[in-house]
Amino acid sequence: MKTYRIALLPGDGIGRDVTDAAWAVLEKTAGSSGFSLEATRYPWSCDYYLENGSMMPADGIETLRSFDAILLGAVGWPIKVPDSVSLHGLLLPIRKAFVQYANIRPHKLLPGVQGPLRSEGFDILCIRENTEGEYSGAGGRVHQGTDSEVAVETSIFTRKGVERILRFGFEQARARRGKLASVTKSNAQKYSMAFWDEITRKLSAEYPDVEVTSYHIDAMTARMVMAPESLDVVVASNLFGDILTDLGAAIQGGLGFAASANINPDRSAPSMFEPVHGSAPDIAHLGIANPVAAIWSGAMMLEHLGEADAAGRVMAAIEATTARGIGAVPSKDKTEAITASVLSALD
Ligand code: GGG
């Protein structure tokens, strides 16, 4: 029997609650699908930082490299560790080291979930550049604490990085409804984002079957609210993609429904799967976090591992659950009840 080795990084806050839920569903699915999953759990988190002075050990990346995939909960607990330290200490280094340059985030309404919009028939695949851009971490501060203090942070856009994420987007659009929206702010950011637009135009010649439209980020935020059904694949930079996909989560009913996959398309290193939401310290360990986004992320992991039938079974179990109204309304049902319903829908 095939066994997949999975690194589990529950992280902080509700990350721990929803990872347990997702793992229960994945294990049961594997058991009835002819493969097995073997989890190795790592406690890397803000608590780990307080004890050890870093978010993960010095050989953390090398430890993770041997796994088939990584399932992560959430990172951050700002009263313990500044958010910039926890993010740049765990999530971002993993994405960069494993060249997980495509962050895929689907936005659509699950059955029974009431979104805030009039339009219900949308199905958007946001693809966020995940290794460079505004989250490159290049910058510094001088004259700290004085009136002359200066903070500089440089966004880095490389031809290789922009071309590969756009190409990934074109391929996804080709496999879906054939429409690609490329998002920048190139009227204001006249070097980096004009460069992105230029590469979009160049690649569009290679994909004559894909209808390409370039949007400014401000226009795209309005479009996602006013006419989400007009969108198919949306490709954006690291920062813009991060922001747009919280908006995407909002139109699909809330952050508890937004799943994501950090993909290494070349498969030269493990990919990582995580709900879009953060650690939500205010509701951590109260048993009320919605595990749907984490379970859906787990389904994306199975799909990536080549277990498409099992992934489809998990999605069907999620849909059967929300269609019955369980987990469909934010904060109404307990984590345990939603998980139990998904588990029983797998029978
Ligand atoms: N579950 C992912 C998580 O912990 N998100 C918190 C966050 O702020 N992430 C920033 C990012 O995805 O770049």
Image (spheres, rainbow, N blue to C red):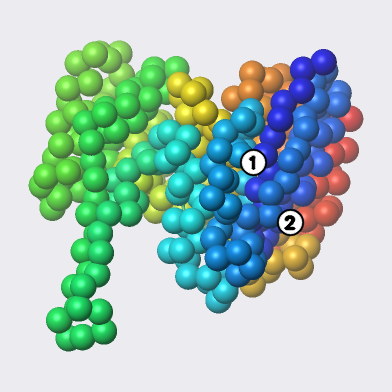
Q: Is mark 1 within 8 Å of ligand 1?
A: no
Task: For residue 120, say whether it is visible.
Answer: no
Mark 2 neighbour density, 10 Å: few (under 14) some (14–19) many (20 or more):
many
Residue 127 % position (x, y): 41, 36
Would you say the residues marked 2 and 1 are in contact, meaning their CB atoms lie under 8 Å apart?
no
Image quadrant where one finds the N terminus: top right
Q: Report x, y in % for residue 161.
A: 29, 33
Residue type pointed to by label 2: Asp
Please identify the quarter of the rendering in which residue 286 is found. bottom right
Query: Which is more toward the observer, 143 or 37?
Result: 143
Residue 229, percent from left and from top: 43, 37
User: How packed is label 1: few (under 14 Cα within 10 Å), some, or many (20 or more)?
Assistant: many
User: Label 1's element?
Assistant: strand
For the point 21% across and 31% down, the residue is 159
175 over 298 or under it: above or below: above
Task: Compute the Cα span from label 2 to label 1.
Answer: 13 Å
Where does the image place residue 218, in percent across and percent down from the top left? 26, 53
Quadrant position of the C terminus in the picture:
top right
Q: Amino acid at mark 1?
A: Leu
Residue at 27 percent of width and 33 percent of height: 162
Residue holding disc 1: 71
Dot 2 or dot 1, earlier in sequence: 2
Q: Is residue 66 left or right of residue 127?
A: right
Residue 17, numbered label: 2
The residue at 37%/27% (across/down) is 169
Report the side of 51 relative to 26 (left or right).
Answer: left
